[in-house]
C-alpha cells in the first residue's frame, strides 16, 4: 500500500482568497478575504509542531503559535482567541499587517521548501470568527486597584498598554489628538491592508473593557502634560514618530512634491468621512506619479496612487529589490496592481518651474561599505529624466519628541528617541520615573507588532512600579509607627 504523504505536503500552503487585481484597484476594500469553510483548520493542521518553535521566537510578542494552531485545527475558536490575547492585545490587526515573511512565517520550519504555515492569516481568521460569534475578553476576575494611568497616543503602543493595565485592575484613560483611535493603524496604513471597521470594532471592545478614550485632545495644546502628572498615578507616552525624512533635493519645494504621510492621512480622512471636502492633492486622475522610497510607506503611497486614478505610478529606489526594506508581500501586491519599479536609481533633482514636470535620476551600483552593507554608488553618465506631475517622498520618519519632554525631565537621545529602560530604570521607564514610553517614539519608525510588545511590557513595568511604591509606603508607615 502506498504510504500517505505528511499533511503539510498533502495540503499545500494557501492564503485566503485574494480579490482579483482588476476589481481591487477600483476600491479600497482589503484585498484578502477569509478562508473557505474548513480551510483555516486544514491550514493550521499543516503545523508539524517541530518542537523548537522558531516562529514563536521570531514573533516580537512571542505568540504561543503552535499551541493556538492546534486549537485552530480542532475548531476550538474561542479557546484559540483567548490564548492569542494572552500575548497580543491586537491579534486580528497583527495578523493583517505584520510582514510575516520577515517574522513568524519566515522562520517556520516548513518555509524551507514546503511553504510556511499561513500563521498571520490564521491569527486574523480566528479572531474575526471569535468576535463574530460573540467572544469577548473576560475581565470578570479583575479586581480594581484604584490606580489610574494616562496614556498619550491611541496607536498600537498606547492601545496595548491600556489593554494590559485594565486587565491588571488599573484604570486607563487614552488621549489622542486625532478623532479616532488607532494612530497609524487608522491614519497611515490604507484600508486595502487594514479595513477601518476592524479598528472600530476593537474600539468598542476596549470601551466595553472599561478603557476611556478622550479623542481630539492634544497634550501640550488642549491639556498640559503637567496636569496629567498631577491627576494620574503614572503616564505612558505612545506618541509615535512623525518627523518626515526630507527629500533634500533641488526642486523639492515645487508644487506637486508631496510628503508621504500628509498624503496618506488626507486620503484616510476622506475615506472615514464621506462628507469631507476632498483634498485637491488627492486628485491624481491622469497624472504621472513617482514615489521615492522602498519601504512599507512607499508601497502604501504607490497603491493609493493607483486607486486615486494615476495614469502611471513609478517607484524609484536607490538599491536593488533584494535590499528593499518593506514586506515582500506588499511589493508583490504593488507590482500586480500596475506599479512600475525602477531599482538602482538615485533621485538627483525634481524638475519644473512652479509645478513638477520631471525627476532627474542616476543609475547606481551597490558596493559593500566598511560594515559590509550594500552602499549605492552613482554610475557616471547614466543620468536620465523621468516625466512626472507628482513626486511623493516616502523616505521614512524620525521620532518627534514633544516640546514639553524637557520640562518634565524626560530625556531623548541625539536622534530624538525617548530614552526608556536601561540603567536602574524599569523597562520602558523614562528618565522621569512616573513616565513610561514605548513604540515608535522610543525605537524610531518600526512595526505595529513591536509597538504592541512595548505597550504590553510597559504596562507590566507600571504595575511593578505601583507595587514598589506600595511596599515603600508600608515600610515608611512601619518605621514611623
Ligand atoms: P502611532 O501609531 O504613530 O500612534 C501615535 C499616536 O499618538 C497617534 O495617534 C498620534 O495622534 C498620537 N499623539 C502624538 N502626540 C500626541 C499628543 N501630544 N497628544 C495626543 N496625541 C498624540 N507597520 C507594520 O507592522 N505593518 C505595516 O504594514 C505598516 N505600514 C505602515 C504604513 C505607513 C504609511 C506608516 C507610516 C507606518 C506603517 N507601519 C507598519 C508602521 C506602524 O504603523 C508603526 O510602527 C506603529 O503604528 C507605531 O505605533 P505607535 O503606537 O508607536 O505610534
Ligand atoms: Fe506573526 Fe505578527 Fe502574529 Fe507574531 S503577531 S504570529 S509576527 S503575524
Image (tube, grey):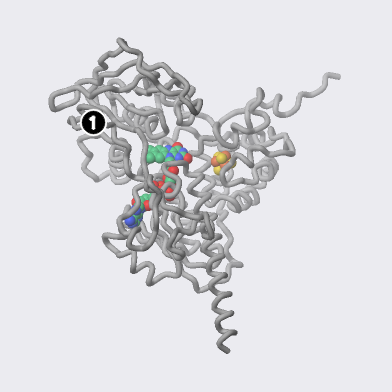
Give the quarter of the image for residue 70: top right
- The reply, left or right, for residue 380 in relation to residue 56 is left
Q: Position of residue 241 (x, y in %)?
A: 37, 46
State the image coordinates of residue 428 (x, y, percent, origin top left).
50, 56
User: On the image, numbered disc 1 is attached to which residue?
Assistant: 257
In screen coordinates, is 210 left or right of 394?
right
Q: Quadrant of residue 218?
A: bottom left
- Helix or strand or loop: what does disc 1 sit on? strand
State the residue in front, 269 or 145: 145
Question: Viewer-proximal residue, 370 or 329?
Answer: 370
Task: Point out residue 458 in the picture as x, y percentages from the top left corner.
Answer: 51, 57
Left or right: 457, with 258 as reference point: right
Give coordinates of residue 195: x percent, y percent: 42, 41
Query: In the picture, residue 173 is in which quadrant?
Result: bottom left
Q: Residue furthest bottom?
A: 481
**Which quarter shows the C terminus?**
bottom right
Res 244 visible: yes
- Image quarter for ligand 2: top right
The reply to whether residue 195 is visible in this rendering is no
Amino acid at each position: 500500500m502506498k504510504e500517505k504523504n505528511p499533511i503539510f505536503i498533502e495540503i499545500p500552503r494557501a492564503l485566503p482568497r485574494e480579490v482579483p487585481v482588476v476589481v481591487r484597484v477600483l476600491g479600497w476594500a482589503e484585498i484578502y478575504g477569509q478562508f473557505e469553510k474548513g480551510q483555516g483548520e486544514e491550514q493550521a493542521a499543516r503545523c508539524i509542531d517541530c518542537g523548537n518553535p522558531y516562529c514563536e521566537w521570531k514573533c516580537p510578542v512571542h505568540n504561543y503559535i503552535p499551541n493556538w494552531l492546534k486549537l485552530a485545527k480542532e475548531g476550538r475558536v474561542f479557546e484559540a482567541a483567548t490564548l492569542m490575547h494572552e500575548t497580543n492585545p491586537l491579534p486580528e490587526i497583527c495578523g493583517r499587517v505584520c510582514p510575516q515573511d520577515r517574522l513568524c512565517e519566515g522562520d517556520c520550519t516548513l518555509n524551507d521548501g514546503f511553504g510556511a504555515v499561513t500563521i498571520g492569516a490564521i491569527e486574523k481568521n480566528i479572531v474575526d470568527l471569535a468576535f463574530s460569534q460573540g467572544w469577548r475578553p473576560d475581565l470578570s476576575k479583575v479586581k480594581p486597584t484604584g490606580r489610574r494611568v494616562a496614556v498619550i497616543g491611541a496607536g498600537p503602543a498606547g492601545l496595548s498598554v491600556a489593554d494590559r493595565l485594565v486587565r491588571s485592575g488599573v484604570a486607563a484613560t487614552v488621549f489622542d489628538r486625532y478623532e479616532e483611535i488607532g494612530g497609524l493603524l487608522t491614519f497611515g496604513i490604507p484600508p486595502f491592508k487594514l479595513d477601518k471597521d476592524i479598528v472600530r470594532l476593537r474600539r468598542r471592545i476596549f470601551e466595553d473593557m472599561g478603557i476611556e478614550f478622550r479623542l481630539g485632545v492634544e497634550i501640550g495644546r488642549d491639556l498640559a502634560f503637567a496636569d496629567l502628572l498631577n491627576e494620574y498615578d503614572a503616564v505612558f507616552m505612545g506618541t509615535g514618530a512623525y518627523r518626515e525624512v526630507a527629500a533634500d533635493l533641488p526642486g523639492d519645494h515645487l508644487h506637486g512634491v508631496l510628503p508621504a504621510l500628509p498624503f496618506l492621512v488626507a486620503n484616510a480622512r476622506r475615506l472615514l468621512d464621506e462628507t469631507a471636502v476632498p483634498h485637491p492633492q488627492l486628485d491624481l486622475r491622469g497624472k504621472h506619479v513617482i514615489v521615492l522610497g522602498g519601504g512599507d510607506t512607499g508601497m502604501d503611497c504607490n497603491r493609493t496612487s493607483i486607486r486615486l486614478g494615476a495614469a502611471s505610478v513609478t517607484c524609484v529606489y536607490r538599491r536593488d529589490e533584494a535590499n528593499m526594506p518593506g514586506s515582500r508581500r506588499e511589493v508583490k501586491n504593488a507590482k500586480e496592481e500596475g506599479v512600475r519599479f525602477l531599482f538602482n536609481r538615485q533621485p538627483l533633482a525634481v524638475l519644473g518651474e512652479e509645478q513638477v514636470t520631471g525627476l532627474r535620476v542616476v543609475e547606481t551600483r551597490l558596493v559593500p561599505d566598511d560594515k559590509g552593507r550594500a552602499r549605492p554608488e552613482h554610475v557616471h553618465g547614466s543620468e536620465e529624466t523621468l516625466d512626472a506631475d507628482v513626486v511623493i517622498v516616502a523616505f521614512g520618519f524620525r521620532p518627534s519628541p514633544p516640546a514639553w519632554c524637557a520640562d518634565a525631565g524626560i530625556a531623548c537621545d541625539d536622534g530624538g528617541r525617548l530614552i526608556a529602560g536601561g540603567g536602574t530604570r524599569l523597562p520602558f521607564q523614562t528618565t522621569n520615573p512616573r513616565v513610561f514610553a514605548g513604540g515608535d517614539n522610543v525605537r524610531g519608525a518600526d512595526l505595529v507588532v513591536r509597538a504592541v510588545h512595548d505597550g504590553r511590557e510597559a504596562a507590566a513595568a507600571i504595575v511593578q512600579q505601583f507595587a514598589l511604591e506600595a511596599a515603600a509606603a508600608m515600610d515608611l508607615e512601619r518605621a514611623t509607627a
